[in-house]
Image (spheres, rainbow, N blue to C red):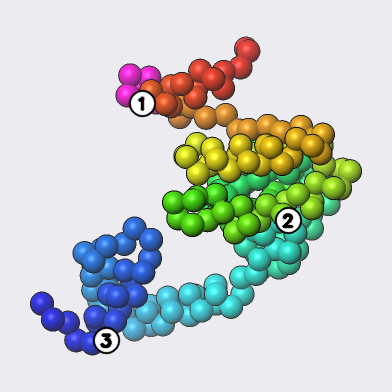
């Protein structure tokens, strides 16, 4: 079916989102068209507001409404640990646990030669410059167990070692409530590798 230009343009814009194919883009476009105009205006305004009012923290590269961000400027945070994450969404996932009270560093990506992303394309230099602060005693690598996450972790480990700072990695394994028989071999291997004494 040939759509009017305005609808075709809307579908095309939705398709630019990650993991959105033609069918999903079409569904989102038609859903938007069925919404009341006031709701569409609020939606458009919220997108513009988010784009205009979101900054990148000059210290940790987290997305925030201020720079430095709320975490970096908080006197309650433990300045001796830096948790390294790939994206702001990873930082948010860790913050939701209310377990970690240190600082963060958002790499804004992972090393991925297949995608043309090298070490110079993410925020590694900025992390290393933060490690010259004598307060930093530990760096926690909270990167995914993907090929890119593993490559980035190994690379960072090599660069951080000379600083004499403790380097740790978050444990990977079975989610709470999961059945062992349904887990894949890599997940089980990571769970055994990350075991701890009771």
Q: Which residue is mark 2?
A: 126
Name the residue located 49 percent from the left edge and 57 percent from the top edge: 116
Q: Please give the label number shown on residue 6.
A: 3
Instruction: Report the number of discs.
Output: 3
- The CA distance from mark 3 to mark 2 is 43 Å
Q: Position of residue 179 (x, y in %)?
A: 36, 22
Q: Secondary structure at mark 3?
A: helix
| 10 part of magenta stretch | no
Kindly tell me whether residue 188 is visible in this rendering: yes
Q: Residue at x 50, y 22 (%)?
A: 191
Which is nearer the N-term, disc 2 or disc 1?
Answer: 2
Q: Are marks 3 and 1 in contact (CB under 8 Å)?
A: no
Picture coordinates of residue 69, whole percent (x, y): 72, 61
Residue range of the region highlighted in magenta in the rendering: 178-184
Q: Which residue is mark 1?
A: 184
Q: Residues within 10 Å of mark 3 (few under 14, many from 20)?
A: few
Q: Residues within 10 Å of mark 2 (few under 14, many from 20)?
A: some
Q: Is residue 137 left or right of residue 94?
A: right
Side of 44 relative to 153 (left or right): left
């Amino acid at each position: 079916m040939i759509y009017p230009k305005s609808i075709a343009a809307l579908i095309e814009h939705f398709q630019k989102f990650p993991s959105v194919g033609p069918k999903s883009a079409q569904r989102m476009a038609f859903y938007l068209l069925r919404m009341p105009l006031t709701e569409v205006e609020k939606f458009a305004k919220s997108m513009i507001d988010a784009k205009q009012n979101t900054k990148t923290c000059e210290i940790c590269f987290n997305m925030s409404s201020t720079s430095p961000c709320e975490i970096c400027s908080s006197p309650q945070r433990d300045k001796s640990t830096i948790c390294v994450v790939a994206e702001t969404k990873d930082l948010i996932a860790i913050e939701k646990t209310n377990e970690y009270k240190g600082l963060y560093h958002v790499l804004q990506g992972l090393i991925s030669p297949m995608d043309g992303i090298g070490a110079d394309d993410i925020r590694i230099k900025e992390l290393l410059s933060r490690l010259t602060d004598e307060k930093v005693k530990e760096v926690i690598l909270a990167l995914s167990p993907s090929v890119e996450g593993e490559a980035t972790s190994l690379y960072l480990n090599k660069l951080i070692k000379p600083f004499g700072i403790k380097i740790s990695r978050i444990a990977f394994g079975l989610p709470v409530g999961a059945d062992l028989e349904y887990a894949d071999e890599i997940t089980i291997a990571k769970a055994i590798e990350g075991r701890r004494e009771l």
